[in-house]
C-alpha cells in the first residue's frame, strides 16, 4: 500500500498532524462546557426573531456589503484577468488574496474608521485577486479557434466580445454566483471587527447570553444562503447591485488626515520613523520576529496541519451521508441539511461559538475548521459518488465504502484537500483574533497597542506564509497529478 | 489581392516534418481542389495558407471554429466584425440591427436552416453546424476562400448546392475535398498531396479519375 505516492503523502501528513497534537494546546477549559452547549442548542431550537429590531437591519447590511464587495471585486478581477499573463500582475493578485478579509478590514478600520468603504474594500480587494486568477483560467481554457475566424481588421474588443466571452460566460457566471455565497459569509464575519453586519449582533447576543437571539440570526443566515437560487436571478441582479450601495449604512465620515498619517507615519517601522538608523531597525525586526512572528508562525502551522487532517477525516466520514450508494432518502435529506449547515457557517463563527462554550484553546479552532471545510469537501465528494455507476453485484455497506468508493474518490479528495490547505491556513491565522495564539492574535494585539508598524509587518509575514503554502499545495498537486476546480 | 504566390511552406510535428517545403502559386479565377489520403497534409496546408495570407482569406476549417454559446446569427455576423465600429458590434451582440438580421436570415434560408437563426450553435446537428461555418465564409466576402472538407457532413443535393454557392461567390479558392467527383465537378485545378508533397498538379480538363486514384 505504501508504494502508492498518494498513500505515502497521506500518511506523512497524518504523522505531522499527530506530532502537532503532542505540542498543541488542546483542552476544554470552560467549567461546564456541556451545559453551555446545551443552552446554545436550546437557543437555536427556540429562536427569537423579534427581540431586537437590529436583526433585520444587520441581515440587510450583510447582504448589501456582500453585493457591493463581490460586484466591485469581480469587476476589478475581470480587468486584472485580461492582463493576468504579466508576472507583476500575477504577483500582485497572489499578494492581495493572501491577506484575509478580516485583516483588510482591520487595516482599513485604522484610517477609514467605521465607514462603509472599510467593509466594501475588505471584501472587494481579496476577492479581486481570486476572481482575476479564476477568470483568467476560464478565459485561457476557451477554444481559441473562433478567434482565428475573425477578420484581421476587427477591433480587439469586438473579437473578445464575440469570440471569447460567450463560451466562457456560463462558467464565469456560475463561479461568480458561488463567490457571492462566499461573500455573504465574509460579510457576516466582518461584524466581528465592528461593522454593522450579522457578526456584530451575534457577538453582542452571545456576550449577553441571549442564545435565542443568536439562534434566530444563524437560522436567518442559513435561510438567506439556502434560498439564494430563488432570489438571485440574472434579471434582478442589476437592481440588487445598483440598490446595494444605499443599504450599507452611514457609518462615520472619513478623516483624510488619518489616511495620510497611516501611510506616512503609522506603518513605518518605529526606528525608521524616529530616525534611529538601520541598527535599531535590525533590533526591531529581531524583536518582532522572536516575540511575536515566530511563535505566531509556529502555532499557525501546527494548528493548520491538525485542522487539515481533521478536515480530511471528517470529509471522508461525511460524504456517505449524501451519497446515493448508501441509506434511504430520509438519511440523505438529513445528511444534506447537516452538510449545508456545516459549509454555510463561516469557520470564524463556528470557532467563536465553540470558544465561548469550551473556553480558549486550539480545540475550538480545529473543530470549527474541520466542520466547515470537511462539510465543503464532503459535499463535493458525495456529489461525485452520485455520478459513479457500480457493477450490480458490488458489495454493500462498509465494504462498498472502503473497496468501491474511497479508492475511486481518493485522488479528487486529496486534490480538494490540498486546494483548501492555503484557505485553512488563512483562516487559522485569522482565528487568532479570537484569542488563539496564531498570527492573527499578534496582529490584533499590536493594533490594540496602537503599534501599526508591528501589525503591518506581521500581516505581511502572514501573507508570505499563505503564498508559500499555496505554492507547496500546488507543487504537491502537480507531483501527484491531482486536478481540481476552485472552491472557496 | 486576387490570387497569391507563396513559397517555403513547411510544417513539423513532434520533430518530424509532415509538410513541404513546398511552393504554391494560385492565379485569380483558379478554383483549386486539394485531394489526397487523410493525413497527407491537406489540413495543414490550408492552415498554413490562412496564416500566410494574414487571415485575409475566408476560412472554413475542419473544426468549424464556431462560438458554441452564440446563436447562428452571431456566428455568421462574426465574419464581418471588421466592417463595423466596436459600438455597432457590441449593440449587435445584445440586439442585432434589422438590416443585418434580414441579410443573414435570407442567407441561412438559402442554406436550408432559416428557422434556426436564434438557436445557439451548441444545439445544432453536425450538418447544420457545418452550414453555419459555410454561411460565415459566404457572408465574410473576402477575395479568396480556403475550405477544409466543407461538405463532409452534408447529403447529396445540399452538398452540390453548397459547392455551387461557394464557387459562385469566390472566384479564387483552395478547397480540400475527399470526394473526387465533387473536386472534378466544381474546381478547375486539382492538386494531389502525398506524404506532405505535391504529387499531382493539373488543370481539371487534363486529369482523369484514375490519375487521382494513384494518390490513395
Image (tube, coloured by chain):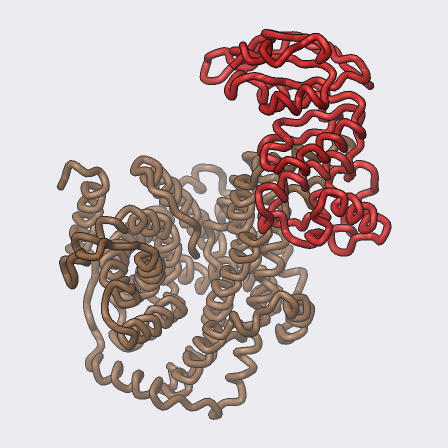
* Residue B2 vertical placement versus A139 (above, below): above
Place of residue A459 in the rendered image (x, y in percent of width and height, measured from the top left): 44, 52
* Residue A227 vertical placement versus A410 (above, below): below
| Residue shown at the point (51%, 21%) measured from the top left | B38
The brown-coloured chain is labelled A
| Residue shown at the point (29%, 48%) measured from the top left | A414
Q: Is residue A426 left or right of residue A151?
A: left
Quadrant of the image containing the N terminus of chain A: top left
Asked whether the viewer can see residue A264, the reply is: no
| Residue shown at the point (69%, 36%) measured from the top left | B134
Asked whether the viewer can see residue A55, the reply is: yes
Place of residue A354 in the rendered image (x, y in percent of width and height, measured from the top left): 29, 73
Viewer-nearest residue: B147 or B15: B147
Q: Is residue B37 left or right of residue A347?
A: right
Q: Colour of chain B?
A: red
Place of residue A357 in the rendered image (x, y in percent of width and height, measured from the top left): 27, 77
Quadrant of the image containing the C terminus of chain A: bottom left
Place of residue B148 in the rendered image (x, y in percent of width and height, measured from the top left): 62, 27
Q: Is residue B152 left or right of residue A429?
A: right
Viewer-nearest residue: A199 or B85: B85
| Residue shown at the point (62%, 58%) measured from the top left | A72
Residue A71 sits in which quadrant?
A: bottom right
Q: Residue furthest right?
A: B99
Amino acid at each position: 500500500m505504501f508504494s502508492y505516492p498518494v498513500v505515502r503523502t497521506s500518511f506523512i501528513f497524518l504523522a505531522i498532524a499527530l506530532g502537532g497534537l503532542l505540542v498543541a494546546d488542546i483542552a476544554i477549559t470552560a467549567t461546564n462546557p456541556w451545559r453551555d452547549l446545551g443552552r446554545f442548542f436550546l437557543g437555536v431550537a427556540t429562536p427569537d426573531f423579534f427581540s431586537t429590531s437590529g436583526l433585520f437591519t444587520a441581515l440587510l447590511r450583510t447582504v448589501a456589503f456582500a453585493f457591493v464587495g463581490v460586484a466591485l471585486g469581480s469587476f476589478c478581477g475581470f480587468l486584472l484577468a485580461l492582463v493576468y499573463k504579466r508576472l507583476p500582475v500575477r504577483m500582485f493578485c497572489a499578494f492581495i488574496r493572501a491577506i484575509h478579509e478580516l485583516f483588510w478590514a482591520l487595516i482599513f478600520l485604522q484610517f477609514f474608521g467605521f465607514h462603509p468603504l472599510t467593509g466594501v474594500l475588505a471584501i472587494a480587494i481579496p476577492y479581486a485577486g481570486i476572481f482575476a486568477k479564476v477568470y483568467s483560467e476560464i478565459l485561457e481554457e476557451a477554444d481559441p479557434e473562433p478567434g482565428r475566424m475573425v477578420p484581421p481588421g476587427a477591433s480587439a474588443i469586438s473579437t473578445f466580445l464575440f469570440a471569447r466571452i460567450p463560451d466562457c460566460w456560463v462558467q464565469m457566471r456560475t463561479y461568480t454566483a458561488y463567490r457571492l455565497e462566499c461573500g455573504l459569509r465574509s460579510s457576516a464575519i466582518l461584524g466581528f471587527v465592528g461593522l454593522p453586519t450579522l457578526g456584530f449582533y451575534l457577538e453582542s447576543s452571545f456576550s449577553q447570553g441571549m442564545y435565542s437571539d443568536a439562534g434566530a440570526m444563524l437560522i436567518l443566515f442559513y435561510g438567506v444562503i439556502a434560498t439564494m437560487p430563488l432570489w438571485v436571478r440574472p434579471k434582478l441582479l442589476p437592481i440588487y447591485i445598483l440598490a446595494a450601495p444605499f443599504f450599507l449604512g452611514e457609518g462615520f465620515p472619513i478623516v483624510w488626515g488619518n489616511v495620510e498619517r497611516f501611510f506616512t507615519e503609522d506603518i513605518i517601522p518605529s526606528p525608521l520613523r524616529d530616525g534611529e538608523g538601520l541598527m535599531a531597525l535590525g533590533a526591531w525586526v529581531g524583536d518582532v520576529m522572536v516575540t511575536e512572528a515566530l511563535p505566531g508562525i509556529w502555532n499557525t502551522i501546527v494548528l493548520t496541519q491538525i485542522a487539515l487532517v481533521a478536515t480530511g477525516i471528517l470529509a471522508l466520514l461525511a460524504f456517505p451521508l449524501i451519497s446515493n450508494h448508501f441509506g434511504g432518502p430520509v438519511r440523505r435529506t438529513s445528511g444534506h441539511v447537516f452538510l449545508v449547515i456545516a459549509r454555510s457557517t463561516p469557520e470564524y463563527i463556528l470557532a467563536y461559538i465553540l470558544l465561548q462554550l469550551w473556553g480558549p484553546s486550539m480545540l475550538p479552532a480545529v473543530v470549527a475548521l474541520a466542520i466547515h471545510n470537511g462539510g465543503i469537501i464532503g459535499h463535493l465528494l458525495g456529489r461525485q459518488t452520485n455520478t459513479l455507476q457500480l457493477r450490480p453485484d458490488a458489495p454493500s455497506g462498509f465494504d462498498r465504502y472502503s473497496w468501491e468508493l474511497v479508492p475511486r474518490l481518493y485522488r479528487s479528495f486529496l486534490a480538494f484537500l490540498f486546494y483548501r490547505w492555503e484557505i485553512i491556513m488563512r483562516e487559522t491565522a485569522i482565528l487568532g483574533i479570537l484569542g488563539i495564539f496564531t498570527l492573527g492574535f499578534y496582529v490584533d494585539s499590536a493594533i490594540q497597542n496602537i503599534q501599526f508598524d508591528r501589525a503591518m509587518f506581521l500581516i505581511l509575514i502572514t501573507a508570505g506564509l499563505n503564498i508559500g503554502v499555496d505554492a507547496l499545495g500546488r507543487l504537491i498537486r502537480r507531483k501527484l497529478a491531482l486536478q481540481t476546480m476552485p472552491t472557496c | 489581392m486576387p490570387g497569391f504566390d507563396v513559397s517555403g511552406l513547411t510544417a513539423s510535428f513532434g520533430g518530424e516534418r509532415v509538410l513541404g517545403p513546398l511552393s504554391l502559386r494560385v492565379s485569380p479565377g483558379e478554383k483549386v481542389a486539394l485531394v489526397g489520403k487523410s493525413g497527407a497534409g491537406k489540413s495543414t496546408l490550408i492552415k498554413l495558407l490562412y496564416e500566410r495570407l494574414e487571415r485575409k482569406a475566408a476560412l472554413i476549417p475542419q473544426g468549424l471554429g464556431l462560438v458554441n454559446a452564440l446563436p447562428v446569427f452571431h456566428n455568421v455576423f462574426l465574419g464581418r466584425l471588421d466592417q463595423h465600429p466596436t459600438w455597432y458590434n457590441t449593440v449587435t451582440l445584445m440586439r442585432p440591427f434589422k438590416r443585418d438580421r434580414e441579410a443573414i436570415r435570407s442567407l441561412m434560408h438559402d442554406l436550408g436552416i432559416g428557422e434556426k437563426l436564434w438557436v445557439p450553435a451548441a444545439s445544432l446537428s453536425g450538418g447544420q453546424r457545418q452550414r453555419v461555418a459555410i454561411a460565415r465564409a459566404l457572408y465574410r466576402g473576402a477575395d479568396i476562400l480556403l475550405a477544409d472538407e466543407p461538405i463532409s457532413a452534408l447529403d447529396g443535393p445540399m452538398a452540390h448546392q453548397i459547392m455551387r454557392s461557394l464557387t459562385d461567390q469566390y472566384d479564387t479558392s483552395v478547397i480540400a475535398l475527399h470526394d473526387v467527383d465533387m473536386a472534378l465537378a466544381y474546381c478547375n485545378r486539382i492538386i494531389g498531396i502525398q506524404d506532405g508533397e505535391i504529387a499531382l498538379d493539373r488543370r481539371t480538363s487534363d486529369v482523369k479519375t484514375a490519375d487521382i486514384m494513384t494518390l490513395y
